[in-house]
Amino acid sequence: MTLNPHHGAQATASDPFGERSRRHVSLCKQIMGGSFRFESASAALLDLVDAAYAGLPSHRLPPAAPEFRIELRLLPPRRAAPPAAEPPPVQMQSGAGLLCGVMDASNYVVLAPAQRQALVVASADMLDRPYHLRYELIEFAVFTLATRGLGLVPLHGACVGREGRGILLLGASGSGKSTLALHSLLQGLDFLAEDAVFVQPESLLATGVANYVHVQADALRFVDDAEIRRWISQAPVIRRRSGVEKFEADLRQGPGRLAAAPLQLAGAVFVSSQPADDPEVLLSPIAESEIAARLAAGQPYAAGQPGWHRFEQQLSRQGVHQLRRGHHPRAAVDALLQLLD
């Protein structure tokens, strides 16, 4: 973006950033099967949108994509906010057909899913916390509108595949999903998403946003290629709410292929941090009678969404496995390839 955020702005005591008088500019992005129009008078906020969604494959899901509208508004900086303090966690509220995610009085999201619209409000000091602003406010609006407007099941997980077929990677935080997704990419599989996957429950078509991969520093010991290690180690470091620090490597500037279209799920695996008893046998099937409980326990938010039971039934028919660790992540990728053959 090359917009001047102050062009034509008339600041007043009640509107010191001149927000009301500036010309709003629109960005249109094809994201997860939906057409999103972002509107703002702030070039800085639109730059964050570009950082998140520019250069991604334009996934399309049947039927024709509806249009969603997200307005982004920048407020003056919070005077009471300590510069280095982590912003407060988002608190959820809903009612009267609206859904709200609130950090504080100057940073919040208001969504009207039935109207396919959202308002994202952020204070200028949050521009110094782009990770939280992007993921917890902007991406929250995008993901929620897409989920509600397209009838998708939102999952905490990753997804990789090849030749149009995908494997859903599930498991607790720290189980190794991101590392496995990264090594799948490095071994030639198509990368769909690392942290959030969205599935049409009837068709089992999966989509997501393949912009970044997040890996901890200790995972670099498994990366043999010096150039790839450099690509990851030179990436910005983000700090999760849990306190875990990870490199945020931009997949659009790295090696491998991003999934050009939604992937048809051929199954799922629960990634385990426990080593396999036999390093030659990493996969073990989960009994069909246990799949529903395992899925619901690991996806409490998704399990309450419309379409969950149909998704669960369809995925159970494809098969769900447990994947334990081998000596190297490459062995886990080889195990995934068995399910994709």
Image (tube, rainbow, N blue to C red):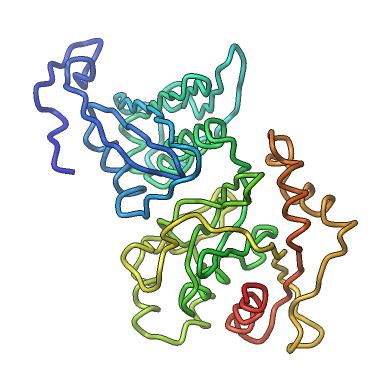
| Residue 243 in sight | yes
For the point 35% across and 70% down, which residue is it? 254
- Relative to 320, does residue 340 appear above or below in the rendering? below
For the point 55% across and 33% down, which residue is it? 90
- Between 21 and 306, the residue placed more toward the observer is 306
For the point 77% across and 81% down, which residue is it? 276
User: What x and y, as percent, mark residue 244?
Assistant: 56, 58
For the point 33% across and 35% down, which residue is it? 125
| Residue 89 in sight | no
- Between 102 and 190, the residue placed more toward the observer is 190
| Figure quadrant of residue 36 | top left
The quadrant in which the C terminus is found is: bottom right
The furthest residue to the left: 8
- Relative to 239, does residue 246 appear above or below in the rendering? below
User: What x and y, as percent, mark residue 118?
Assistant: 43, 25
The furthest residue to the front: 63
User: What x and y, as percent, mark residue 124?
Assistant: 30, 32
- Relative to 183, does residue 263 appear above or below in the rendering? above
The quadrant in which the N terminus is found is: top left
